[in-house]
Amino acid sequence: MIAPWLILLFIGLYFLSLLFIGWLTSRNSNAETYFIGNKQSPWYLVAFGMIGDSLSGVTFISVPGNVGVAHFSYLQLVIGYFFGYFIISHVLLPTYYKLNLISVYEYLLKRFGPITQKTGSFFFILSRLLGAAGRLYLAASVIQFFVFDQINDFHVPFSVSVFIILVLMMLYTYRGGIKTLVYTDTFQSLFLVGGVILSIVAIGQGMDKSMPELVSGIIESDYSETFFWDFRRSNFFFKEFLGGVFIAASMTGLDQNMMQNNLSCKSLKEAQRNIFWFSIVLVFVTFCFLSLGALIYQYYDFSGTALPTNLQTGKIITDKVFPNLALNHLGVFAGMVFIIGLTAATFSSADSVLTTLTTSAYIDIFEFDRKKQLTEKESKQKRVIIHATFALLIWLTILLFERWNQTAIISTILMVAGYTYGPLLALFFAGLFTKWQFKDQWVPVIAILGPLFCYGVKLITENFPNGYQIGNELILVNALITLSLLQLVRLPVK
């Protein structure tokens, strides 16, 4: 097992690197720097940096671990992502650039009204708060278990270690905002992708197999099963594919966190180029993570190592499968490679969220950009207060995850997205593809009722014997229900 002090040393050096990047990129920064990077972000850096934002610790730990249960079925979802990004590039980005938006929910203001704008922002904040907390909880819990819990006479509670991580993130993001994040995300994506590639190499060395032998072993194994055709199951191909299309369109295209980076590009053409290359790289990188998962389980079989299981239920704890192998059984090289990837995932999973949550609250909820002309000093003070408040909220949410979450985090995050992004998908669809208008004051009520009705439908279908199981197409079901309910508050055509 790797010495905990060595892991702490690496994490410390990694943080100093991020702090240095933050210092370089935040000099002479202002509100425009914080929100849109002065519209000078290189598209190729944005594209590569978005890999870290999209994958984070969930992909690094939960996706490989889940291969033992779900095989390569996750790839069905990612294929859908690719087509979802096409919608973003050719429908959403042209609209955002034409209106010169900073927050994408300003579109809802222009199309429907201020209450609808705040409704959209609220659902984004809720979803990203839960999603960021879930991602950071996963990575931080691994660091807690393999570092702080292993140091004798140095008992740091989980709540304290997570708080420290969030404070470190604030130190390099609170001034530079998006301009800083474009560069730190690129730095972290490099470590994240390098972590998975070197992990594959380490496992190959552990089993004394060449790369061609590893590839053939993956292809011939049951783990490589990708496409599933039982329409009643949640992993049915078309459920996963459609779910992927609409999850990508919503969680990226209607998400301030992902779009704020894109809106910092110099032009629409560069932003579209960024999305195109990002979508291709994402499919390839996800395939690498799934392949890593197959190799991890093969190594457990090869070495006779016991899989981590829940002592009460006897089920495999999938989110501990990769960390346990890398840090306890594969040697120092594999362990440090894992820490490289995990550290990148830990910081990339929440730092950009702090900035974009601040942006949405500043512009959409409190309307500081429209209420009065703030001085740069006043604007900075309000940004810092909001920034720190969201860091505190993420910390509290992580503590709730620690207490109650009992499933693979990847499943939890996709489920949360299905319920919280459904109303956003319905509102943007109505705005972009219809001429409908709604009674603005009633939109929040409908946006809450939609997910509640969707949850009821999911419960009913689950109780049918051998019945239909709603999977990742939940977001589409939710959007259709919300869109139908919006007809109740639709204004008559003038």
Image (spheres, rainbow, N blue to C red):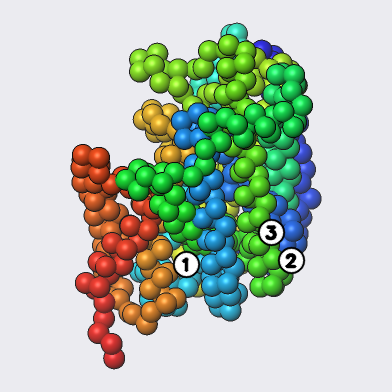
**Measuring 21% from the left and 46% from the top, which residue is drawn there?**
460
Question: Which residue of the protein is positioned furthest toward the front in this rendering?
Answer: 220
- Above or below, 445 relative to 14: below
Q: What residue type is disc 3 on?
A: Trp
The residue at which mark 2 appears reads as 40
Q: Residues within 10 Å of mark 2 (few under 14, many from 20)?
A: some
For the C terminus, the image quarter is: bottom left
The residue lying toward the viewer, choosing from 163 and 106, is 106
Q: Is residue 169 left or right of residue 431?
A: right
Q: Which residue is mark 1?
A: 105
CA gap between label 1 and label 3 equals 25 Å
Residue located at (66% from left, 55% from top): 280
Residue 150 found in image quarter: top right
Q: Quadrant of residue 234?
A: top left
Q: Which mark is residue 363?
A: none
Residue 185 position (above or below residue 331): below
* Percent coordinates x, y for residue 431 in the rendering: 41, 75
- Looking at the rendered image, the disc whose residue lies closer to the viewer, 3 or 2, is 3
Q: Is residue 186 visible?
A: yes
Q: CA distance from mark 3 to mark 2?
A: 19 Å
Q: Which mark is residue 277?
A: 3
* Marks 3 and 2 in Cβ contact (< 8 Å): no
Nearest to the observer: residue 380 or residue 53: 53
Task: Give left or right: position of 468 versus 308.
Answer: left
Q: Amino acid at mark 1?
A: Tyr
Q: Identify the amino acid type marked 2.
A: Gln
Give percent across and percent down for residue 371. 47, 72
